[in-house]
C-alpha cells in the first residue's frame, strides 16, 4: 500500500480575480474578524491565511473545526456583533492503522523555521513514554509524547503524541492549555479524570508538566540524543546488565541504578555525566542522586526508546550491538 501525504493548496482564483490580497502561503489574507483586504468581503476556511496563535506568523491550516469557528465569527461580524478569531494552533489527529498520531501548537521544525520573535532560540523539549493508563490495570498501551515549552516563562508551545490509546485525549488537554496561555507549571497541577481503566494518578499530561518543570527549576536538566554525538561527556547507562547486553550506546558505561550509590566514586567529577535508561525514569532517579552528590549529571530525555524512535527502528534491530551515539 502506498499512502500519499501530498498537502493542500487553497483554490483562490475567485479571490485573485476580485483583487484580494493573497499571502505568501497562497491563502487569502484575513484579519481576526475574517475581513479580507476588501472591507466588503469576508473569507473563511481552507482558503484563508490566519495568524498562528503561538508564533504569531501567518499560517495555513485546512481543518474543519477552524473553518467552522471562522464561519461563525464572520457571521457575527457581518451582523454587527463583536467577535474575533483567536488564531489557529494546528490541533490535529490522524489514525494510521492501529496507531494514533496527534499534535497541537508548534513543532520543533516549525519553531526553528519561525522568523518572528526568534521563538526558535528560547525553547526546550522533553520526551516521555507513559502508559495510557496505569500498568497494573490490564491493557495499558504506551504513548510517546513530546512537549515543547518556552525556557523564558514555561509557556507551552506545542506537543506531539503517538500511540494506540488515549493519545488524542492528552493532546486535547494540552491544546486547551496552549490556548489559555498556560505553562508547564499548570500542567503539573492539572486535575484530570483518573480511575485505573482511564489514566493514572499522575496522568501523562501531569508527568509531561512535571518533567518540564523539573528542567526549568534546575532540579533535573535534560540532554538530547542529538547532543551526545559531539559531547565529551561521560555516558552512563543505568539499566540492568541484561538490558545493556542487548544493545547500548557506543562508549557508554553501565552502572545499574540500584548500585549507583555504591559506585559514585568511580564516576568523573570534572566531566558532565549524561545518563540514560530505557525510557528516562531510572535515569531521572540516577541524575537526581548524582546531582545531589555534586556531580554534573543530565538525563537524556526519553532514553533508549526515544533513541530508537528518532532513528525509526525498533530496538530489536541491533540486538547484540552497540549503536553509535547521537
Ligand atoms: C478527505 C478529507 C478528509 C478530511 N478530514 C478531516 C478531518 O478529519 N478533520 C479535519 O479537521 N479536517 C478534515 N478535512 C478538512 C476539512 O474538510 C476542511 O478543512 C473543511 O471542509 C474546510 O471547510 P471550507 O468551508 O473552507 O471548504 P469546503 O468544505 O471545501 O467547502 C467549500 C465549498 O465551496 C464550493 N465551491 C468551490 N468553488 C466554488 C465556486 N466557484 N462557486 C461556488 N461554490 C464553490 C465547494 O463545492 C464546497 O462545497 C478533510 C478533508 C478531506 C478532503
Image (cartoon, rainbow, N blue to C red):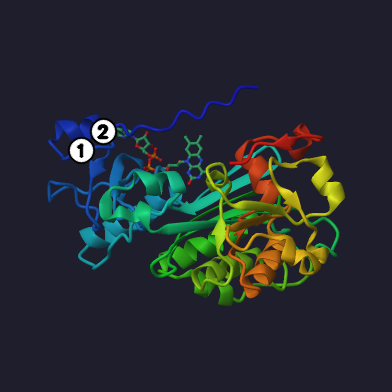
Mark 1 vs mark 2, CA separation in Å:
8 Å
The residue most toward the top is 1
Whether residue 279 is situated above or below residue 43 in the rendered picture: below
Identity of the residue drawn at 18% across and 47% down: 36
User: Can residue 128 be seen in this snapshot?
Assistant: no
Q: Which mark is residue 12?
A: 2
* Residue 322 in which image quadrant: top right
User: What residue appears at the point 24 percent right and 67 percent down from the top-left corner?
Assistant: 81
Quadrant for the N terminus, please: top right
Left or right relative to 210: residue 18:
left
Where in the figure is residue 49, as x and y percent of width and height?
A: 28, 45
Q: Mark 1 highlights which residue?
A: 22
Looking at the image, which residue is at 57% across and 58% down? 272
User: Nearer the viewer's eye, disc 1 or disc 2?
Assistant: 1
| Residue 176 point in image, percent of width and height | 48, 65
Residue 248 drawn at (x, y percent): 74, 43
Residue 173: image quadrant is bottom right
Which part of the image, by quadrant, shows the C terminus?
top right
* Mark found first going from the N terminus, 1 or 2: 2
Contact? badges 1 and 2 (CB < 8 Å): yes
Density class for disc 2 (Cα within 10 Å; few <14, some 14-19, many ≥20) is some
For the residue carrying disc 1, how many other residues have a C-alpha within 10 Å: few (<14), some (14-19), or many (20+)?
some
Q: Nearer the viewer, residue 34 or 169?
A: 169
Q: Nearer the viewer, residue 161 or 306?
A: 306
> Which element is circle 2 on?
loop
Q: Is residue 285 left or right of residue 74?
A: right
In the foreground, 271 or 154: 271
Residue 214 sits in quarter: bottom right
Q: Is residue 58 left or right of residue 260?
A: left
Amino acid at each position: 500500500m502506498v499512502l500519499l501525504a501530498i498537502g493542500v493548496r487553497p483554490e483562490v482564483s475567485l479571490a485573485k480575480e476580485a483583487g484580494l490580497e493573497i499571502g505568501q502561503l497562497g491563502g487569502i489574507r484575513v484579519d481576526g474578524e475574517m475581513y479580507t483586504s476588501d472591507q466588503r468581503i469576508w473569507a473563511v476556511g481552507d482558503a484563508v491565511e490566519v495568524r498562528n496563535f503561538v508564533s504569531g506568523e501567518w499560517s495555513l491550516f485546512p481543518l474543519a473545526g477552524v473553518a467552522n469557528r471562522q464561519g461563525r465569527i464572520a457571521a457575527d461580524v457581518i451582523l454587527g456583533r463583536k467577535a474575533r478569531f483567536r488564531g489557529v494552533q494546528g490541533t490535529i489527529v490522524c489514525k494510521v492503522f492501529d496507531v494514533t498520531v496527534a499534535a497541537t501548537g508548534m513543532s520543533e521544525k516549525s519553531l526553528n523555521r519561525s522568523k518572528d520573535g526568534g521563538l526558535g532560540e528560547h525553547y526546550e523539549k522533553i520526551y516521555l513514554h507513559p502508559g495510557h493508563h496505569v500498568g497494573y490495570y490490564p491493557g495499558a498501551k504506551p504513548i510517546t509524547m513530546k512537549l515543547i515549552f518556552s525556557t523564558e516563562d514555561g509557556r507551552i508551545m506545542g506537543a506531539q503524541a503517538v500511540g494506540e490509546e488515549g493519545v488524542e485525549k492528552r493532546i486535547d488537554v494540552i491544546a486547551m492549555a496552549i490556548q489559555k496561555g498556560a505553562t508547564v507549571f499548570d500542567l503539573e497541577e492539572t486535575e484530570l479524570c483518573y480511575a485505573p481503566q482511564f489514566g493514572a494518578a499522575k496522568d501523562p499530561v501531569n508527568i509531561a508538566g512535571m518533567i518540564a518543570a523539573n528542567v526549568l527549576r534546575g532540579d533535573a536538566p535534560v540532554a538530547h540524543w542529538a547532543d551526545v554525538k559531539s559531547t565529551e561527556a561521560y555516558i552512563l547507562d543505568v539499566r540492568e546488565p541484561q538490558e545493556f547486553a542487548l544493545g547500548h550506546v557506543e562508549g557508554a558505561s553501565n552502572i545499574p541504578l540500584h548500585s549507583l550509590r555504591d559506585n559514585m566514586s568511580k564516576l568523573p567529577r570534572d566531566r558532565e555525566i549524561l545518563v540514560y535508561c530505557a525510557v528516562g525514569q531510572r535515569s531521572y532517579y540516577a541524575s537526581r542522586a548524582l546531582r545531589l552528590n555534586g556531580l554534573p549529571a543530565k538525563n537524556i530525555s526519553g532514553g533508549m526508546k526515544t533513541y530508537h524512535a528518532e532513528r525509526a527502528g525498533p530496538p530489536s534491530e541491533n540486538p547484540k550491538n552497540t549503536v553509535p551515539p547521537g
